[in-house]
Amino acid sequence: MTQETAPPTPATLESPSPWIRRHLLDLDDFTRDEIDTVLNTTDAMKEVLGRDVPRVPALRGKTVITLFYESSTRTRASFELAGKALGADVINVSAGGSSVEKGESLIDTVRTLQAVGADLLVMRHGSSGAPYLAARHVRASVINAGDGWHAHPTQALLDVYTMRTHLGDLRGRRVVIVGDIAHSRVARSNIWALTAAGAEVVVCGPLTLLPAGLRPGDPRSEEPLSLPPVKVETNLDRAVEGADVVMALRLQQERMHSGLLPSLREYATLYQVNEERLARAQPGALVMHPGPMNEGIEISPSLATSLQSVIEEQVTNGVAVRMAVLYLLARGKA
Amino acid sequence: MNGHTVLSADEMRRAIRRIAHEVVERNGGVSDVVFVGMRTRGVPLAQRLADAVLEFEGEAVSVGALDIGLYRDDISSKELSPRLQPTEMPTDIDGRRVVLVDDVLYTGRSIRAAMDALTDFGRPSGIQLAVLVDRGHRELPIRADYVGKNIPTALEEDVQVLLEEVDGADEVRITRSEGER
C-alpha cells in the first residue's frame, strides 16, 4: 500500500485487528485473532531468516535488553538473534548469583535498564509474576521469557507455530502434554495458546505432578481454576490415543527430592514418550519437546531424533517467533 | 459509500495494457524484466501486467511480491496494519530490470522502503516504477516511470483502489476522509 493514511476498509476485506499490546506477559487473555497475527507475522520473519543476509532495519535504533535471573540457552540466544535480525541493538544482562530477589532490587534493576535506554526488556525470573512487577515500573515493553511456574508465552507461540506449519488449522486437533504439568510454565502457556487456537488439550502425568485444580477428586478441583478447560488423563496410553501432537515436558530432577516421584525409573516406565506409545496416536503425529531433554527419561532417544520429531524445528522457529513478538510490541507503542 | 469513481473497470484494464506495452517498448523486450508487486494490491497488478505481456509478446515474466513492512521509517505509526506477509522473490534479481508495481503513488515513502528491501535481495541493473494512480503530494524525490492515471487530489481525500482479486471488483474511487485519524 502506498497510501500513508489508511483508506476506509472495503467490506470485502478482512479487517485487521489492531495490535494494542505493549507487553507480552502471559497468553491467558489472547484471542485467536491475536495469536493468528503473531503466527502470520512469524511467516514473514521466516522468509527474512531464509535470506543470504538475514537482517532487516525494522527495529533500527531500538534497544533490546535481555535480563535473565535464571539460566537459559535457547531462549536467550534466540531473543538475541531475533533482535539483531531486526536491526536492534541487543544487550544481555545476567542477574548472576542468587542474591537478587524480588522487591526493591528488581524494580531498581529494571529502572536502571530503562534509564540506559531499553525499549524492549526481555525478562526471565524464577518468581511467578516478576515480569508483571517490572511492567508496572517501566515505559519499555516487557516480554516474559519465563517466570517461575507461571508462563513462558514465546515458547507456547513457537510450539503453536510449529504445529500449524505441519497441521494447518489447529481447530479440533488433539494435543497431549505429558509430564510435570504442575510446575511447568511451558504447559500453562501452551494450554492457553492451544485453547485459543481451538485445539483439544489433554494433559497427562502422575497425580502428584498435576496442578491441584486438575486432580480428579481433589477438593480444590471444585474451585475456579486459572486455566481453560482441558482433559486430564493419568494413563499415557489412553491419553495418546488418536493424538495429533504429543509433547513431552522436561522432568526436573529436583521433583524426586521433594518426594513427588518415587523414582526416575518408574516415571520412565509409565510416562516416557516412546515408539510403542506413539503408535496409538494418529499416523505421522508430531513429537515435541521444549528442551532441554532428558533423553531416556521423558522421551526415548530414538524418538527424539526420529522423522516424527520436530524438536529441532521448534528451536529454529523460536527465532522467527521472537522476531514477530519484538516487532509487534515495538510498533504497538506510539 | 461517499465519493466518486475516477477509473472504471474498463479504463483500468486499458491502462494496465498500455503500461505493459510501455514496459516492453522501453526495455526493448522483457527478457531481463521482473515485475515485483508491493503488497497488497501491487501484487495482483503486477500479475496482470505479466499476463498482458504474455498475451501480446508470448513471453512469461516472473512476478514477485514485496512486503515493505520491515523497511518503513514509521514503525510506530498506529495507522499501519501490523499484518506482515512474506516477501516472495521468484528469481535472482541481480542484473535484472525490476519494475516495481504499486496501486497508488503518494508521498513516495513506500517506494523508498521498497527500494531498500529490493537491494537486500540483490543488485538489479535498474529499478523502474509502475503505478496505477499517481495522486501527487510527494515528500521524497521519487517519480513513476509508468502511470495508469494522474489524479490530482486534495490531502483530505483518499484514493481507494479496488481490485477483483482482493476486493471483488475493479474500480478506483476518491473519497473524503472522515475527520481526524
Image: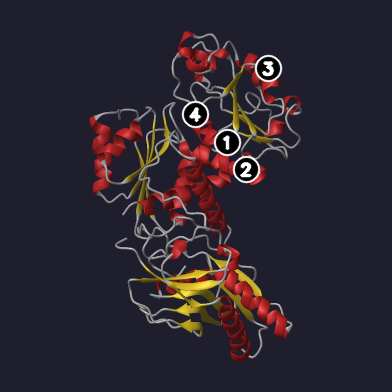
Mark nearer the N terminus (2 vs 4): 2
Q: Residue at x 58, y 42 (%)?
A: A314
Query: Is A187 situated left or right of B17 in this image?
Result: left
Whether A49 is drawn above or below A244: the answer is below
The residue at which mark 4 appears reads as A188
Query: Is A277 situated left or right of A122 in this image?
Result: right
- Chain under disc 1: A
Q: Secondary structure at mark 1?
A: loop
Mark nearer the N terminus (1 vs 4): 4
Marks 2/1 in contact by CB < 8 Å: the verdict is yes
- Chain under disc 4: A
Mark nearer the N terminus (1 vs 3): 1
Tell which tag, 4 or 3, sits nearer the viewer: 4
Q: Amino acid at mark 1?
A: Gly
Where is residue B38? Give x, y as percent. Answer: 52, 69
Where is residue B33? Give x, y as percent. Answer: 62, 81
Which quarter of the figure has residue A135? top left
The residue at which mark 1 appears reads as A198
Q: Amino acid at mark 2?
A: Asp
Q: Amino acid at mark 3?
A: Thr
The residue at which mark 3 appears reads as A269
Q: Secondary structure at mark 4?
A: helix
Q: Residues within 10 Å of mark 4 (few under 14, many from 20)?
A: many
Closer to the camera, B7 or B83? B7
Disc on res. A169: 2
Q: Residue at x 23, y 31 (%)?
A: A104
Marks 4/3 in contact by CB < 8 Å: the verdict is no
